[in-house]
Image (cartoon, rainbow, N blue to C red):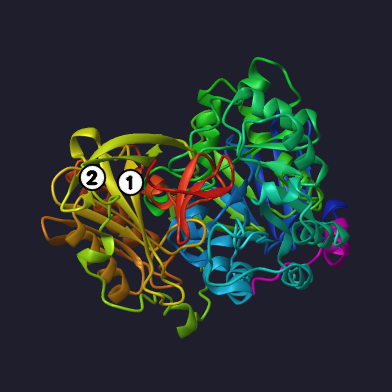
Amino acid sequence: MNTLKTWPEAAPRLIAVAAGRSPADTVIRQGKWVNVQSREVLDGYDIAIAEGRFAAIAPDLSDAIGPDTQVIEANGRFMLPGLIDGHMHIESGMLTPAEFAAAVIPHGTTTMFTDPHEIANVLGLAGVRMMHDEALMQPVSIFTQMPSCAPSAPGLETTGFEISAEDVTEAMTWPGIIGLGEMMNFPGVIAGDPKMLAEIAATQDARKTVGGHYASPDKGAPFRAYLAGGPADDHEGTREEDAIARVRNGMRSMMRLGSAWYDVKTQITAVTEKGLDPRNFILCTDDCHSGTLVDEGHMNRVYRHAVACGCPPLVALQMCTVNTATHFGLERELGSIAPGRRADVILSSDLVTLPVETVIARGRIVAENGRLLAECPHYDWPESARQTVHLGKHLTAADFAIAAPEGANTVTAKVIGVVENQAPTKALTAELAVADGLAQPDAAKDIAQIALVERHRGTGGVVNGFVSGFGYTGRMAIGSTVAHDSHHMIVVGTDRDSMAAAANRLGEMGGGITVWKDGAEIAAVPLPIAGLMSDDPAAEVAARASRMVAAMAECGCTLNNAYMQHSLLALVVIPEIRISDLGLVDVTRFELTDLFE
């Protein structure tokens, strides 16, 4: 575990350094102090660091330099706090916490608030503990939110494990648990479900933060009921009015820019045009896959995007530093360059484009000019975490056949409609042909088949349906064991033989992603840990993921970050229509629905 002295433990030394009685461990000299507490830039300042924390910031701290003090010359560069991601799921990066940290540290991310509800659905509380323990081993701060909803929608899906109120109570005693993960079962909260309220109560009794998830445009009685239930933030807003409604009611509005969700531009106008108090707004990723992390960045990417959307740089910086720390009750611990806080600093020559030139975490240089300089230790993942794909049988094309009503020449089918760059789907209908008694996909209408294959208990179960929006053509299939949130297996294809081949390949591989075209596999991303993550280096995983994205394009797909859309097709808590191991789900009504009208 990467230990850090608490403020009380470090206080005598910090005071001595600040008073000039003791040399600092590190002094950063003569830079521009970017002060997110006062929202100003102060030129010509030094920063003294001791015990991994800031001891003092002043125009001249030469008296804190001793013979063993490390001196870092800022040379007039901006000295700003390390960046904080307020909401994300490490598993969505296809990486373990160690490799995720290794990927984002060079981008200036020094703190993350993570909700490992992906692994909770596969391995339960034991999986959450594994994620929590590896997170605490890292040279940066990774706080864990205890997952709240596994399953996310009881009665509409079956998970590998279920999280109970007792599990939440136990987790609140763990050292790295900062609060409750996003309360996705918003209908349960609205209905006063005792289990959901018990989880919220256990979190509040521990004086920790309850994460929110209200995926509905309805701002009437359901929204009011959810607010009264206690969630303190929400990242599901997509419109300016969503952000405004949340902050007016005492929530923090978390605006996300991930690999597939572009919800900052449409909401940040609540600050830039409507003039709302920016301290109630937080930037986050939710989520970035490995390719985005390696090629484009992490929170530095979100910050640059917010600035490009018209947000003043210092305001945008507050949204990914001190605002987030304050929200989680850690304003005195991190999020700003101020005495006593963890010494997380970025040195950069420009505040708009934010080149991340030097990254310091807990007083140590951990990256320079894009190169990682710190060790990110790995947890010893057990075999139980690596053997999680249980199909129960060898699948064939017959498992993916969709029988039409007897005697029908055509059918009117409900179709999941993918919406580019957004999490919600559209509930569509289409008239489809019937051949040999089976309803057929229709490439001309951009309608492919989708299947949800049970993979936790080996039941051999397959639920079939239709999906539109990917643009697939020819004989193809893509299968993935990343299938938010229950993480069974999603297979989308135009050809039943290819779909069976993809599903069986994932069983052999132990989880991951596979793309098939014309009867052969053309790309694969092995994810052996829980069928969700790889402990290979991020660059290697990103290269495989990049090949996977290219393979999807070779199959006709033109969507931006289509794989993220694919992985969410079973997320039965975001409207309008999804698929689960129990059937097709109408998420506007939270009930199972028939495939054919």
Tell me the kind of residue under disc 2.
Pro
Residue with the most extreme bottom position = 383
Q: Is residue 32 visible?
A: no
Image quadrant of residue 148?
Answer: bottom right
Image position, residue 384 (x, y; %): 48, 83
Image position, residue 274 (x, y; %): 69, 16
Image quarter hosting the N terminus: bottom right
Nearest the eye: 199 or 300: 199
Q: Residues within 10 Å of mark 2 (few under 14, many from 20)?
A: many
Main secondary structure along the magenta-highlighted residues = helix
- The residue beneath circle 1 is 466
Image position, residue 124 (x, y; %): 59, 72
Q: Magenta stretch containing residue 195, yes or no?
A: no
Nearest the eye: 410 or 389: 410
At 27% from the left edge and 51% from the top edge, which residue is drawn? 406
At 88% from the left edge and 56% from the top edge, which residue is drawn? 15
Residue with the most extreme top position = 273
- The residue beneath circle 2 is 441
Image position, residue 512 (x, y; %): 35, 65
Q: Magenta stretch containing residue 11, yes or no?
A: yes
* Rendered position, 185 above or below 35: below
Q: Secondary structure at mark 1?
A: strand
Q: Secondary structure at mark 2?
A: loop
* Rendered position, 236 above or below 100: above
Image quadrant of residue 193?
Answer: bottom right
Q: Are marks 2 and 1 in contact (CB under 8 Å)?
A: yes
Image quarter hosting the C terminus: top left
Nearest the eye: 172 or 424: 424
CA gap, disc 2 to disc 1? 7 Å
Q: Residues within 10 Å of mark 1 (few under 14, many from 20)?
A: many
Range shown magenta? 1-16
